[in-house]
Image (cartoon, helix red, strand yellow):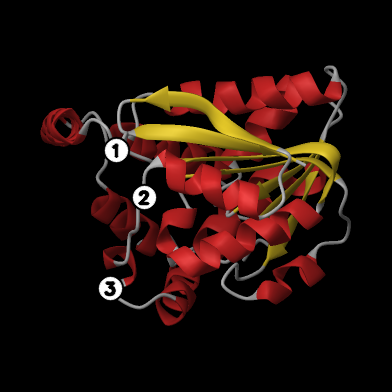
Amino acid sequence: MSAYLTNADIYQESWDRQQLAFMPDREERFGAMLNAVAAVTDGAPPRLLDLAGGTGSIALRTLARFPGARVTVLDQDPVLLAIATASLRERGTIVDADLSDPAWRSKLSEDGFDAVLTATALHWLPAERVATLYGEIREVLRPGGIFANADHMPEESLPGLSERLRSYARGRRDARYAAGAATSWTDWWKLVAADDFLAEKVVERNRIYPLDHHSTEWTPPAIWHLDALRVAGFTEAGVLWRGGTDAAVVGVR
């Protein structure tokens, strides 16, 4: 068997389609974060950490926008890391680390990143761990570097409208599934489990993550994240982007 997944580009495409069903404005949040990266590097190729980066979605878009960028993808999911490894090959560094363990930083081969970006990932960690993690992230940034987190962050002053926005999004997503325009989260993983190369990675993944892993989602409003970033020592913290009940917050070291 090949050392790499041979059809990584196809899995990247199917992952993107599956994620777009959840987040139709996914590319907008990526674009907003990469605009901030360009601003703090004056357009020069950045050193970027794609944190909890999965298949390397942010890293790949960074390389496309900034030829010569040095990218690192850090995640724990063996399936998504296999896709990222095959997609990046010699163009980036892959790190297998658990963000619930403060020792994750020791797995990095460098620090002083221009930017640490993450999207739709940290809501699986408990509140106290996220708050502590923000301080750890600050330590791997260079002075003036940025950290951006795009995730489900409802506007607390709009509880009624937020619920209606979520309901509308669910309806659109279900319609896409019914029409075959996108694969659901559950069905995507079934397809992965049927792949000869990835099947053993799925078994490994099931050992790492309990069956109820996705029942622990925690999504506080953006203000919680801004307060946590300031407590962690970031000199500036604010909302970089918003789309419905999702937002991207950014902190400047």
Residue named by callout 2: 220
Taking the spot 12% from the left edge, 30% from the top edge, the residue there is 164
Foreground mark, 1 or 2, reads 1
Q: Quadrant of residue 47?
A: top right
How crowded pointer 3 is (Cα within 10 Å; few <14, some 14-19, many 20+) is rated as: few
Compare residues 226 and 212 and report the one nearer the observer: 226
What x and y, as percent, mark residue 50?
66, 46
Compare residues 24 and 190 and report the one nearer the observer: 24
How crowded pointer 2 is (Cα within 10 Å; few <14, some 14-19, many 20+) is rated as: some
Q: Identify the amino acid type marked 2.
A: Pro
Compare marks 2 and 3 and give the one earlier in the sequence.
Answer: 3
In this picture, residue 13 sits left or right of residue 5: left
In this picture, residue 80 sits left or right of residue 213: right
* Residue 57 can be seen in this image: yes
Q: Identify the amino acid type marked 1.
A: Glu
- At mark 1, the secondary structure is loop
Query: Does residue 107 sit above or below 226 in this rendering?
Result: below
Quadrant assignment for the N terminus? bottom right
What x and y, as percent, mark residue 26?
43, 29
In this picture, residue 146 sits left or right of residue 240: right
Q: Identify the amino acid type marked 3.
A: Asp
Residue named by callout 1: 156
- At mark 3, the secondary structure is loop
Residue named by callout 3: 212
How crowded pointer 1 is (Cα within 10 Å; few <14, some 14-19, many 20+) is rated as: few
